[in-house]
Amino acid sequence: MGDASLIERGFDELPAEIALLDTHGDIIYTNRAWRMFAETNGYVGDVDAIGVNYLDVCEAARDEDETAGLVADGIRALLRGQQDLFAIEYPCHSPTVYRWFMMRAVPFDTPRHGRFVLVMHLDITERRLAELQVNEKNQHLAMLAHVLSKDLKEPLTAAIEKAGRLVAKDAPDASSLSKILSRIDAIIEQSVTLADQVATLELEPVDFREYVETEWEAIGNASDIDFRVTGGGVLAADEHLFGLFLSSLFTNNVRRSSVPGYPSQIVVGATIDGFYVDDDGPRPTAEERAAATGRNQLLGVDYDSVELSVTKRIADLHGWDLDITESELGGARFEVRGITWR
């Protein structure tokens, strides 16, 4: 097998459309992917496009397509030796399919025939669609944060203040109303935090034991619970979100451990690739398992599982796995895996 046929066969196996241009911009070679794309999309003329001047085609479309003009200018700069690489991303939609491509062009010189330019068009549709989906989700989260923090926060604050005055007057059901409103307020705070920070994850070294003890002390109604921490270490996490993760998880554990008829004990410990939180409340419910393992949830599957959905979301953002099983204390074990201790 000759060198030329070997090189051509190699180009034919590439998934990208490739064309070779001579010093005038004429196409002197195209690979199989190029020919198949031309045939599939109804190209008028020989699908190999040999002899077609690439620069002329781009110039003909300059007035209608800004990208075509940029490509023509970029290739000329390569042929003149003014730059060593030209790359551009562009849409190439058909009547039925959305498509995006990346074009990369590089020059090279030969002793006998002068300068050539190798042009490659790579289909990046999957990446672009993923980016668009992420952008859309971020826009939805930003809208959610605005609604929660602006439209709901002010009337809720007023309602909490009125409920507090009713509690002071020993009004019937006032205490229950105050707790419900405070619970809604906490849900809004957690949701706003996630919506604001989902696109700005900043990983920093975090002292596990220090954060655990700090967040536990912030739990105001847990003085009668036997709380212990075993092990420790430093992990990479977003400091604010990790604090919210622990706070949400502990709040859920306190609620479970305060069930009448159950003792009150919570144990937090480090493992080889993560950590766990054990409680001695009731065994995990189907709703708790759904909230802790469900995907793409921002709020919980029901009123009582919001904290678990928050922890699941934060775990996903960090690339951790969150699982819930039965603990040795008789209640539930919430275990995080996928952490590399430093």
Image (spheres, grey):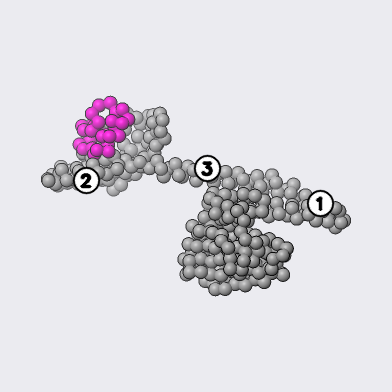
The disc labelled 1 sits on which kind of residue?
Answer: Lys
- Say if residue 317 shows up in the picture: no
**Position above or below: 241 against 224:** above
Which contiguous range is marked in magenta? 27-54
Residue 197 as seen in the image, left or right of residue 181 = left
The location of residue 160, given as percent across then percent down, is 77, 52
Disc 2 crowd, CA 10 A, few/some/many (<14, 14-19, 20+): few
SS state under label 2: helix
Residue at image x 61%, y 52%? 287
**Distance from Cα at disc 1 to Cα at disc 2:** 76 Å
Other-residue count near label 1 (Cα within 10 Å), few / some / many at <14 / 14–19 / ≥20: few
Residue under label 3, please give it. 136
Picture disc at residue 219 = none
Residue holding disc 1: 162
What residue type is disc 2 on?
Answer: Gly
Question: Which residue is located at x 28 percent, y 48 percent?
Answer: 84
The Cα–Cα distance between marks 3 and 2, rounded to whole angstroms, is 39 Å
Q: Nearer the viewer, residue 40 or 336?
A: 336
The first of marks 1 and 3 along the sequence is 3
Dot 3 and dot 2 residues touching (CB under 8 Å): no
| Residue under label 2 | 10
